[in-house]
Amino acid sequence: MSGQTVKITIDGSVVEAREGLTILQAAGEAGIYIPHLCYHKDLLPGGHCRVCTVKVNGKPINACTMVVGGGMVIENDTAELNDLRKSIIEMLFVEGNHICPGCEKSGNCELQALAYRFGMMSPRYPYLFPAKQVDGSHPNVYIDRNRCILCGRCVRSSQEKDHKRVFGFEDRGIQMRLAVDSERQLAETDLAAADKAASYCPTGSLVVKRVGWKMPVGTRKYDKEPIGSDIAGRRK
Ligand code: FES
Protein backbone atom coordinates (compact mmCIF):
# COMPACT_ATOMS: atom_id res chain seq x y z
CA MET A 1 0.00 0.00 0.00
CA SER A 2 1.37 3.39 -1.01
CA GLY A 3 0.14 5.53 1.90
CA GLN A 4 -1.60 7.76 -0.65
CA THR A 5 -5.30 8.38 -0.37
CA VAL A 6 -8.05 8.86 -2.91
CA LYS A 7 -11.47 10.39 -2.60
CA ILE A 8 -14.51 8.23 -3.17
CA THR A 9 -18.19 8.92 -2.63
CA ILE A 10 -20.36 6.44 -0.76
CA ASP A 11 -24.09 7.14 -0.67
CA GLY A 12 -23.41 10.81 -1.22
CA SER A 13 -20.68 11.18 1.45
CA VAL A 14 -17.15 11.94 0.30
CA VAL A 15 -14.69 9.58 1.97
CA GLU A 16 -10.89 9.61 2.05
CA ALA A 17 -9.72 6.07 1.27
CA ARG A 18 -6.22 4.61 1.46
CA GLU A 19 -5.00 3.38 -1.90
CA GLY A 20 -4.89 -0.39 -2.15
CA LEU A 21 -7.84 -0.98 0.16
CA THR A 22 -10.95 -2.63 -1.17
CA ILE A 23 -14.20 -0.70 -1.15
CA LEU A 24 -15.36 -2.83 1.80
CA GLN A 25 -12.24 -2.07 3.81
CA ALA A 26 -12.25 1.63 2.98
CA ALA A 27 -15.92 1.93 3.88
CA GLY A 28 -15.24 0.13 7.16
CA GLU A 29 -12.44 2.53 8.03
CA ALA A 30 -14.86 5.39 7.42
CA GLY A 31 -17.49 3.79 9.65
CA ILE A 32 -19.74 2.76 6.80
CA TYR A 33 -21.05 -0.77 6.99
CA ILE A 34 -21.31 -2.72 3.77
CA PRO A 35 -23.07 -6.01 4.54
CA HIS A 36 -20.94 -9.05 3.79
CA LEU A 37 -20.81 -12.73 4.60
CA CYS A 38 -18.02 -14.72 2.98
CA TYR A 39 -15.52 -11.92 3.64
CA HIS A 40 -13.54 -11.98 6.89
CA LYS A 41 -11.07 -9.25 7.75
CA ASP A 42 -8.28 -11.73 8.58
CA LEU A 43 -8.58 -13.70 5.34
CA LEU A 44 -8.09 -13.01 1.68
CA PRO A 45 -11.43 -12.18 0.05
CA GLY A 46 -13.21 -15.07 -1.61
CA GLY A 47 -15.89 -13.20 -3.55
CA HIS A 48 -18.34 -16.08 -3.20
CA CYS A 49 -21.54 -14.78 -1.65
CA ARG A 50 -22.29 -11.44 -3.38
CA VAL A 51 -23.87 -10.03 -0.20
CA CYS A 52 -21.39 -7.15 -0.41
CA THR A 53 -22.65 -6.06 -3.84
CA VAL A 54 -22.52 -2.29 -4.31
CA LYS A 55 -22.88 -0.21 -7.42
CA VAL A 56 -19.79 1.61 -8.65
CA ASN A 57 -20.61 4.31 -11.16
CA GLY A 58 -23.89 2.47 -11.73
CA LYS A 59 -22.45 -1.05 -12.17
CA PRO A 60 -22.89 -3.87 -9.62
CA ILE A 61 -19.63 -5.12 -8.17
CA ASN A 62 -18.28 -7.02 -5.14
CA ALA A 63 -17.11 -4.50 -2.55
CA CYS A 64 -14.86 -7.13 -0.94
CA THR A 65 -12.70 -7.64 -4.02
CA MET A 66 -12.80 -4.29 -5.84
CA VAL A 67 -9.97 -1.93 -4.92
CA VAL A 68 -10.81 1.75 -4.48
CA GLY A 69 -10.09 4.22 -7.26
CA GLY A 70 -10.24 8.00 -7.10
CA GLY A 71 -13.60 9.46 -8.07
CA MET A 72 -15.60 6.26 -7.63
CA VAL A 73 -19.25 6.97 -6.93
CA ILE A 74 -20.55 4.09 -4.85
CA GLU A 75 -24.11 3.19 -3.93
CA ASN A 76 -24.41 0.95 -0.89
CA ASP A 77 -27.38 1.50 1.41
CA THR A 78 -30.16 1.61 -1.17
CA ALA A 79 -33.50 -0.19 -1.25
CA GLU A 80 -32.51 -2.03 -4.43
CA LEU A 81 -29.17 -3.31 -3.11
CA ASN A 82 -30.58 -4.22 0.28
CA ASP A 83 -33.33 -6.21 -1.39
CA LEU A 84 -30.73 -8.01 -3.51
CA ARG A 85 -28.80 -8.85 -0.35
CA LYS A 86 -31.95 -9.98 1.39
CA SER A 87 -32.79 -12.25 -1.57
CA ILE A 88 -29.32 -13.85 -1.31
CA ILE A 89 -29.83 -14.48 2.41
CA GLU A 90 -33.26 -15.96 1.71
CA MET A 91 -31.74 -18.22 -0.95
CA LEU A 92 -29.12 -19.46 1.50
CA PHE A 93 -31.84 -20.28 4.01
CA VAL A 94 -33.91 -22.33 1.55
CA GLU A 95 -30.89 -24.12 0.09
CA GLY A 96 -29.88 -25.45 3.52
CA ASN A 97 -31.65 -26.58 6.66
CA HIS A 98 -31.18 -23.74 9.15
CA ILE A 99 -33.11 -24.53 12.32
CA CYS A 100 -31.98 -21.52 14.31
CA PRO A 101 -33.69 -22.27 17.66
CA GLY A 102 -31.80 -25.58 17.91
CA CYS A 103 -28.44 -24.32 16.69
CA GLU A 104 -25.61 -23.69 19.13
CA LYS A 105 -24.43 -20.78 16.97
CA SER A 106 -27.72 -18.89 17.38
CA GLY A 107 -26.97 -15.31 18.39
CA ASN A 108 -23.42 -15.58 17.07
CA CYS A 109 -24.39 -16.60 13.54
CA GLU A 110 -23.75 -14.06 10.80
CA LEU A 111 -26.34 -15.56 8.46
CA GLN A 112 -29.02 -15.31 11.13
CA ALA A 113 -27.88 -11.80 12.04
CA LEU A 114 -28.11 -10.65 8.42
CA ALA A 115 -31.59 -12.16 8.15
CA TYR A 116 -32.62 -10.08 11.17
CA ARG A 117 -30.92 -7.01 9.78
CA PHE A 118 -32.81 -7.27 6.49
CA GLY A 119 -36.09 -8.09 8.20
CA MET A 120 -36.39 -11.53 6.62
CA MET A 121 -39.67 -13.24 7.41
CA SER A 122 -40.76 -15.94 4.93
CA PRO A 123 -38.23 -16.40 2.11
CA ARG A 124 -39.52 -15.59 -1.36
CA TYR A 125 -38.24 -18.96 -2.61
CA PRO A 126 -39.62 -22.39 -1.71
CA TYR A 127 -37.69 -24.39 0.88
CA LEU A 128 -35.74 -27.21 -0.75
CA PHE A 129 -35.17 -29.30 2.41
CA PRO A 130 -32.08 -30.94 0.90
CA ALA A 131 -30.57 -34.08 2.39
CA LYS A 132 -27.17 -33.06 3.81
CA GLN A 133 -24.49 -34.96 5.65
CA VAL A 134 -23.28 -34.44 9.18
CA ASP A 135 -19.76 -35.56 10.03
CA GLY A 136 -19.20 -36.08 13.74
CA SER A 137 -16.25 -38.40 13.34
CA HIS A 138 -13.59 -35.99 14.62
CA PRO A 139 -13.13 -35.98 18.40
CA ASN A 140 -13.19 -32.19 18.70
CA VAL A 141 -14.87 -30.62 15.66
CA TYR A 142 -17.94 -31.54 13.66
CA ILE A 143 -19.34 -30.52 10.31
CA ASP A 144 -23.06 -29.99 9.89
CA ARG A 145 -23.53 -29.44 6.17
CA ASN A 146 -27.18 -28.52 6.76
CA ARG A 147 -25.84 -25.17 7.92
CA CYS A 148 -23.01 -24.76 5.44
CA ILE A 149 -23.40 -21.78 3.08
CA LEU A 150 -20.27 -22.58 1.03
CA CYS A 151 -18.64 -19.29 1.91
CA GLY A 152 -15.19 -20.85 1.79
CA ARG A 153 -13.92 -19.26 4.98
CA CYS A 154 -12.84 -22.65 6.37
CA VAL A 155 -11.10 -23.44 3.10
CA ARG A 156 -9.19 -20.17 3.16
CA SER A 157 -8.42 -20.17 6.89
CA SER A 158 -7.14 -23.75 6.76
CA GLN A 159 -4.70 -22.72 4.03
CA GLU A 160 -3.83 -19.19 5.14
CA LYS A 161 -3.81 -19.57 8.92
CA ASP A 162 -3.26 -23.26 9.63
CA HIS A 163 -1.08 -23.92 6.56
CA LYS A 164 -3.02 -27.07 5.78
CA ARG A 165 -5.57 -28.04 3.17
CA VAL A 166 -8.23 -29.72 5.25
CA PHE A 167 -11.23 -28.28 3.40
CA GLY A 168 -12.27 -27.78 -0.20
CA PHE A 169 -15.34 -27.93 -2.42
CA GLU A 170 -16.56 -30.72 -4.62
CA ASP A 171 -19.24 -30.87 -7.34
CA ARG A 172 -20.99 -27.83 -8.77
CA GLY A 173 -24.23 -25.88 -8.61
CA ILE A 174 -26.82 -27.14 -6.16
CA GLN A 175 -24.74 -30.33 -5.64
CA MET A 176 -21.70 -28.39 -4.47
CA ARG A 177 -20.59 -29.43 -1.01
CA LEU A 178 -17.87 -28.88 1.53
CA ALA A 179 -15.33 -31.67 1.23
CA VAL A 180 -12.48 -32.71 3.49
CA ASP A 181 -9.00 -33.85 2.65
CA SER A 182 -9.77 -37.52 3.10
CA GLU A 183 -11.54 -40.24 1.17
CA ARG A 184 -13.98 -40.53 4.02
CA GLN A 185 -14.38 -38.35 7.11
CA LEU A 186 -13.04 -35.39 9.04
CA ALA A 187 -11.38 -37.64 11.63
CA GLU A 188 -9.00 -38.87 8.94
CA THR A 189 -7.70 -35.40 8.10
CA ASP A 190 -4.95 -33.56 9.96
CA LEU A 191 -7.41 -31.03 11.43
CA ALA A 192 -6.45 -30.26 15.03
CA ALA A 193 -8.69 -28.87 17.74
CA ALA A 194 -6.58 -25.71 17.94
CA ASP A 195 -6.73 -25.00 14.21
CA LYS A 196 -8.17 -21.64 13.26
CA ALA A 197 -10.41 -23.07 10.55
CA ALA A 198 -13.43 -23.80 12.76
CA SER A 199 -13.43 -20.36 14.34
CA TYR A 200 -13.97 -18.56 11.02
CA CYS A 201 -17.23 -20.32 10.12
CA PRO A 202 -19.97 -17.67 10.06
CA THR A 203 -22.73 -20.21 10.79
CA GLY A 204 -23.03 -23.34 12.90
CA SER A 205 -21.62 -25.58 10.20
CA LEU A 206 -18.12 -26.10 11.51
CA VAL A 207 -18.30 -26.24 15.25
CA VAL A 208 -15.87 -27.06 18.04
CA LYS A 209 -17.49 -29.68 20.24
CA ARG A 210 -18.47 -29.13 23.87
CA VAL A 211 -18.32 -25.32 23.84
CA GLY A 212 -21.42 -24.34 21.85
CA TRP A 213 -23.79 -23.73 24.75
CA LYS A 214 -21.29 -22.25 27.21
CA MET A 215 -22.63 -18.73 26.58
CA PRO A 216 -26.41 -18.63 27.09
CA VAL A 217 -28.65 -17.70 24.18
CA GLY A 218 -29.80 -14.12 24.71
CA THR A 219 -26.36 -12.91 25.78
CA ARG A 220 -24.51 -13.47 22.51
CA LYS A 221 -23.02 -10.94 20.13
CA TYR A 222 -25.98 -10.39 17.82
CA ASP A 223 -28.52 -10.83 20.61
CA LYS A 224 -27.24 -7.50 21.88
CA GLU A 225 -26.72 -5.44 18.73
CA PRO A 226 -27.40 -5.83 15.00
CA ILE A 227 -24.61 -7.04 12.78
CA GLY A 228 -22.60 -4.07 11.48
CA SER A 229 -23.09 -1.96 14.63
CA ASP A 230 -19.39 -2.14 15.48
CA ILE A 231 -18.46 -0.66 12.09
CA ALA A 232 -21.17 2.00 12.08
CA GLY A 233 -20.01 2.92 15.60
CA ARG A 234 -16.63 4.04 14.17
CA ARG A 235 -18.24 6.82 12.17
CA LYS A 236 -17.22 10.29 13.29
FE1 FES B 1 -18.02 -10.05 -0.89
FE2 FES B 1 -19.05 -12.37 -0.10
S1 FES B 1 -18.55 -10.66 1.10
S2 FES B 1 -18.65 -11.68 -2.13
Image (cartoon, helix red, strand yellow):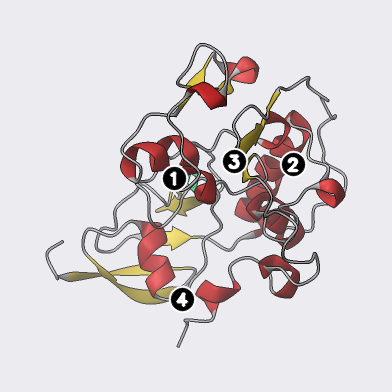
Label 2, label 3: how far apart the Cα atoms are = 31 Å
N-terminal label among 2 and 4: 4
Left or right, 154 with reference to 20: right
Q: Residues within 10 Å of mark 2 (few under 14, many from 20)?
A: many
Q: Residues within 10 Å of mark 1 (few under 14, many from 20)?
A: some
Name the residue that disc number 1 marks.
195
The picture places residue 173, in percent across and down from the top left corner, at 59, 18
Label 2, label 4: how far apart the Cα atoms are = 26 Å
The picture places residue 123, in percent across and down from the top left corner, at 82, 41
Q: Amino acid at mark 4?
A: Gly
Q: Residues within 10 Å of mark 4 (few under 14, many from 20)?
A: some
Q: Amino acid at mark 1?
A: Asp
Q: Which is more toward the observer, 73 or 83?
A: 83
Q: Is residue 202 above or below residue 94?
A: below
**What label does residue 31 carry, if any?**
4
**What label does residue 33 carry, if any?**
none
**What label does residue 90 carry, if any?**
2
**SS at badge 1:** loop
Which residue is found at the position 34% from the left and 33% from the top?
164
The nearer-to-camera label among 2 and 3 is 3
The nearer-to-camera label among 4 and 1 is 1
Q: Are marks 1 and 3 in contact (CB under 8 Å)?
A: no
Name the residue that disc number 3 marks.
140
Q: Amino acid at mark 2?
A: Glu
**SS at badge 3:** loop
